[in-house]
Image: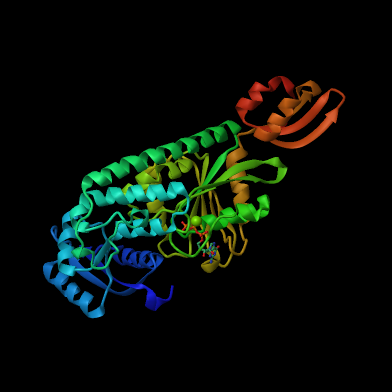
């Protein structure tokens, strides 16, 4: 979309007690606004010792902004925090234009990007949950496609409140049960995966860090199927769904790799709740690859946010490998490996072998390596092991198939009778 065609947005933030990371959050808000296809015309910042409860801002400041909205013909005012229902209502009557807060902005982006049925449902649930307590302030309509929150409608302030709480609640119940059905399918898939005993590795991290780029690198190198590739793009929240791919590297070693939604500071609670089943994939991983955009001066903040989000979804006990990506922009010497941390660049294909070494080391170091001789009469075990363990070599003698295999301890114990040589 051309800039002049975009709706015009004014950013507003209250800096309480001169918070250190305030400007960073405002910059991030600006990126979110761009990701929402709006055009930023300016920023208004007020320093306050605390938020003015009924109005978020001071009254004078709010009126000043209202004049600016008129003078500059601004379509939407975007607030840096989540507004309470009262604040939203009061601001609406003073500003008389569309209002978004950080939460509804993120919801709006998610709703534009959602492609799969599940993602669409999840976003819609989160939007309705957000709307419910704010009905009076929003003057919204459910009639728009996808049940949009309607906060975008210019002049929506004059619109009559068309929706009652009851209708939203009914709709929520309906959507949630649809989601429940979908998440059952996902659960079945997950069980099958678990039974397959192939380890699951999940890419996690802040939005735009390069998770999908790493996923695509692995697909290019090991899957050789363009159709299996995922979207990677220079914008916040390019990925909204979970994709899982089976990656088979040398020695017949294999693992499942999942790529999913990125995190951001103050990710709306309702959204995290609604995306529970999408994020579930992370919870079940054997290993996390946390991708960090090391060229971003605030990379350490991003690590904190990721840590908090992982805690929220119950995934904080899983071992992590840190992949400091985009390092070519800030470091001369690449790659650099330091324990479980690696500085690399997917874009320049530097450090990817080292990353794979780290992953395989983490995944398979406690596997048992041995040679098994399996009688020809038990051909099904040979295929089982090929599917569910890492068969590194296959030979035959007159008594049966001899597999050089790397497998879980449980598998080793179960098929011990066939072991002819331990290799560890
Ligand atoms: N300079 C540089 N850019 C990179 C590198 N890796 C990825 N990128 C770029 O970073 C942007 C984001 O990459 P993605 O892979 O889509 O990031 P993501 O973590 O999946 O992002 P979300 O899905 O939005 O959470 C893209 O424009 C990539 O081309 C790298 O090593 N160096
Ligand atoms: Mg992505």
Query: Hey, which quadrant is residue 113 in on the image?
Result: bottom left
Instruction: Decide if residue 155 is on the left or right side of residue 55.
Output: right
Give x and y (percent) for residue 391.
Answer: 72, 36
Quarter of the picture containing the C terminus is top right
Quarter of the picture containing the N terminus is bottom left
Instruction: Decide if residue 162 is on the left or right side of residue 240.
Output: left
Coloring applied to the structure: rainbow
- What residue appears at the point 36 percent right and 43 percent down from the top-left corner? 175
The foreground one among 109 and 128 is 128
| Image position of 212 with respect to 311: above or below | below
Q: Residue furthest right?
A: 398
Residue 370 in view (yes/no): no
The foreground one among 282 and 192 is 192
The foreground one among 330 and 284 is 284
Give x and y (percent) for residue 272.
Answer: 36, 47
Query: Hey, which quadrant is residue 102 in on the image?
Result: bottom left
Residue 58 in view (yes/no): yes
| Image position of 58 with respect to 304: above or below | below
Q: Residue furthest top?
A: 417
Give x and y (percent) for residue 194.
Answer: 55, 33
- What residue appears at the point 15 percent right and 61 percent down from the top-left corner? 90
- What residue appears at the point 49 percent right and 65 percent down from the top-left corner? 234
Instruction: Decide if residue 100 is on the left or right side of residue 420.
Output: left
Q: Total marks drawn?
A: 0
């Amino acid at each position: 979309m051309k800039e002049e065609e975009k709706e015009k947005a004014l950013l507003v933030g209250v800096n309480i007690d001169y918070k250190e990371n305030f400007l960073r959050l405002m910059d991030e808000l600006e990126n979110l606004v761009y990701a929402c296809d709006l055009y930023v015309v300016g920023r208004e910042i007020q320093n306050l010792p605390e938020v003015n409860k009924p109005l978020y801002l001071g009254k004078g400041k709010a009126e000043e902004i209202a004049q600016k909205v008129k003078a500059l013909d601004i379509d939407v005012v975007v607030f840096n925090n989540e507004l309470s229902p009262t604040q939203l209502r009061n601001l609406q009557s003073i500003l008389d234009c569309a209002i978004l807060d950080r939460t509804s902005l993120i919801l709006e982006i998610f709703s534009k990007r959602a492609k799969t049925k599940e993602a669409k449902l999840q976003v819609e649930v989160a939007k309705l949950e957000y709307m419910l307590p704010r009905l009076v302030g929003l003057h919204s309509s459910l009639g728009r496609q996808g049940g949009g929150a309607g906060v975008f409608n210019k002049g929506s302030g004059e619109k009559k409140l068309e929706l009652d709480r009851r209708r939203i609640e009914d709709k929520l119940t309906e959507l949630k049960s649809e989601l429940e059905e979908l998440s059952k399918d996902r659960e079945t898939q997950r069980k099958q995966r678990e039974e397959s005993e192939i380890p699951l590795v999940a890419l996690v991290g802040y939005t735009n860090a390069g998770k999908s780029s790493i996923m695509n690198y692995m697909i290019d190198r090991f899957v050789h199927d363009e159709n299996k590739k995922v979207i990677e793009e220079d914008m916040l929240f390019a990925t909204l769904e979970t994709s899982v791919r089976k990656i088979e590297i040398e020695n017949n070693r294999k693992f499942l790799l999942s790529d999913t939604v990125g995190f951001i500071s103050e990710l709306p609670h309702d959204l995290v709740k609604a995306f529970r089943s999408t994020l579930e994939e992370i919870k079940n991983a054997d290993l996390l690859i946390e991708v960090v955009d090391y060229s971003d001066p605030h990379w350490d903040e991003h690590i904190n946010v990721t840590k908090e989000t992982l805690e929220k979804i119950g995934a904080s006990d899983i071992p992590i490998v840190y992949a400091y990506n985009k390092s070519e922009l800030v470091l001369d010497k690449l790659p650099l490996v330091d324990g479980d941390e690696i500085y690399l660049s997917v874009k320049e294909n530097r450090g990817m072998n080292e990353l794979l070494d780290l992953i395989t080391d983490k995944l398979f170091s406690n596997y048992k390596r041995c040679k098994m001789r399996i009688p020809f009469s038990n051909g099904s075990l040979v295929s089982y092991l090929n599917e569910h363990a890492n068969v590194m070599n296959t030979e035959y003698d007159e008594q049966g198939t001899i597999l050089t295999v790397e497998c879980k301890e449980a598998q080793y114990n179960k098929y011990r009778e066939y072991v002819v040589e331990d290799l560890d």
